[in-house]
Amino acid sequence: MIYPTNFEEKTGFSTIRKMLYQFCISGMGLEKAKAIGFCADTTLIDKSLLQTESMLKLMDNGMPFPVKDYVDIREELHRLRIEGTVIEQEALFELKTGLGIVHQILIFASSEGASSYFPVRQLTEGLTIDKMMLREINRIMDDKGEIPDKASELLAEIRQDIRRKQGTIERRIRQMLGEAKHAGWTESDVEVTIRNGRMVIPVRAADKRKIRGFIHDESSTGQTVYIEPAEVFDTNNEIKELEYAEKREIHRILAAFSQLIRPQLPMLHRHWNMLGEIDLMHAKALLARKINASKPQLSDYPVADWRNAVHPLLEISLKEQKKTAVPLDLQLNEEQRILVISGPNAGGKSVCLKTTGLLQYMLQCGLMVPMHPDSRAGIFDHLFIDIGDEQSLENDLSTYSSHLLHMAHFLKHANERSLFLIDEFGTGTEPQSGGAIAESVLEALNEQRAFGLVTTHYANLKLLADKAEGIFNGAMLFDIRKLQPLYILQTGKPGSSFAFEIARKTGIPEQVLEKAATITGFSQLNFEQQLQQLETEKREVAKKQAELRLADSLLNEVIEKYKRLLKQLEERKKGLLLEAGREARSIIDKANRQIELTIKEIRETQAEKERTKTLREELQLMKPLLETEANKKADAIQIEDLKEPELPATLKAGMMVRIEEMDITGELLSISPHEAVVIFNSVKLRTSPEKLSPLSHKEQRKEERKTFKRNAGNIGDDINEKAANFKLTIDVRGKRAEEALETISRYVDEAMLLSIKEFSILHGKGNGILRRVIREFLSKMKEVSHFEDASLETGGHGITRVKMK
């Protein structure tokens, strides 16, 4: 149940609905959008949200079928149920277009890729297209909406006769026009023209009797008459009869096709219903993208755990002013069902209510809502709202009486699956009585275990939230220093109205405010100020704590990095010491071997004095050599980690290199002991020289071939783009002769590049100067094979047809 009847206007959903209508592209989709309404079935709501989510994924990944040209032909299909009715040619073209789209959708639905888009695939279940009908409609209707000659043998014969007779008439009339020019009966620069669907010759009024024929028209001055020669009059009548025969044959073809598709009408209705569903899904997806909406987690029971919820219309309005809306966080559950919001005027209390009402209603209409996707949203059976002034002179209702009527309805119908929203609860009458009634109504709604949000300035309602189970306070925060609202809802404690601060800001005299303060009592004012001051300081402390946590995190990261480097240095130090020990042992072993060898030789020579002296001298010479070697080893170990890294001998600027860890090849622009710069696909990459390795000649040739292929691919893409954008007619009307020739020259170059053999130049008739200049230019071009005037029906001498060699 939705109450009151103007709920959509009060919450702003009527504007959301209009936005949805604008995104629909067909009558079927618009009809379904208008049927959208409040729903309490979780399964249906979830199905609608999943469809929108699936459509958004399709849009992001590239639509496999078009969402355009969904023309509503259901009325024509309904008319064709009657035996003997014939489909109109225009409706046949719309049917062909629609069937082509349906065919693409069914092909996608049967593909493996459609498994990721089940909500879209589900729409096609049970749908088929009769192949014979599809072949027949493609045979009798071309892509321009015309019935082609191949539609029947008789139609081809009739049209061939028409073209033959028209050619005969055109040749004879041009011959007679030449004779009339030669005789001076008509101006030298006139051409054959069309009047009443017939070819006619413009003749001076004074010479009109010189040519036998039928006068179809005359010029506005009366000096020229347009005559259809008698020689071609009978042939023209024959053409007219052939045209009637052509119409009869087309009608026969359409009647035969209508009979063919009559058994398929029920399936065609289902096809067009599916197109309407696709259109609606696409419109919902576009709306979701427009308001930055998402699909929250759904619950079958009443609950609200919203994060970063935003009023979509307010967000759009503020974006135009280059501002942002403050998001709303809201929690309603079994323990805390009714939120009493207090705070200053213009502080955002009513916006909270409207945001809650609009988003809940949008969700239960199957639309995505602008809130964090991790939010949880429940389903309610009843939505009640009391916002704004409902006084009525016609019904003799005051503002307060209308509020009481709403309260009576709430009390009568509210239950544990109801959500009520009441703005400025209890106002409109004497404060003491209004506050008492509001408190009593709120207690009754709480006993009925309904969910709700109310805004108020009454202290007794704030106190009720502290003592009644299920009711809790919330405050719209206010910056007491800057004297401006923060538009942030904080639950847990009531807020102040800040009446004196706002009055002071609006310019109320200070002496008036001082007197008001004495009436109210300074203690009450000081208490509210201190409460708000504490809240402001609490927010600042929380902000500082967040900054400290961030700084602490960064410090911990630096410490961890330092510890990691220190550990690496210690491990390196141990390795160096072990290596030094091994080298020292090697030197000692070498010295020992030399000494043992000397002793052995002394023994073998029986200690001859001369030989012993010689061996001792050799040992003395060996000693400094060993010391020098040991010192070199020690110095090398000590400075190994301190010396500058040497550049790889094979690397130098201009070489082709590979960055090993990224598997990227490019040209080495510059290199230093600590940094190398490599260019890859016009992007400069900086890395250390140790990560580079030079490419062999074979690898360089391979990379050059790859680069050539990429460039060749780019050239092919350019040619394809030119071919797609090339038009077979160039318009140079209004240009000066030099500009026109330059434009035509470029156009001819493109035509040669794309192998275009025939095109048209639209230069207009006028005085014929531009036409003459262009033709002189074309006659000098070797690439041009032939040029001539277009046929009379397609522009005559105002267009030159050009054929290339």
Image (cartoon, rainbow, N blue to C red):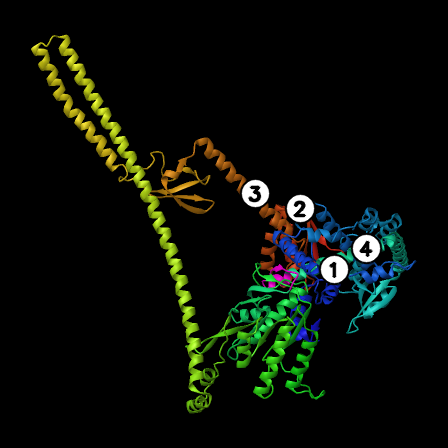
- Looking at the image, residue 395 sits to the left or right of residue 545; the answer is right
Q: Which residue is drawn at 51% across and 74% down?
A: 475
> What separation in Å lies between label 3 and label 1 (alpha carbons)?
41 Å
Element under label 3?
helix
Q: In this view, does 216 lie to the left or right of 785?
A: right
**Mark linked to residue 713:** 3
Q: In which quadrant of the rendered view does residue 569 lie? A: top left
Q: Position of residue 512 (x, y in %)?
A: 44, 91
Q: Give the range drawn in magenta.
A: 286-301
Query: Label 2 amino acid?
Result: Gly
Q: Do the residues labelled 4 and 2 touch (CB within 8 Å)?
A: no
Task: Indicate which disc residue 276 carries.
Answer: 1
User: Above or below — where is 37 with respect to 754?
Assistant: below
Depth check: give the residue in front, 402 or 729. Answer: 402
> Circles 3 and 1: CB distance less than 8 Å?
no
Q: For mark 2, what is the residue?
A: 113
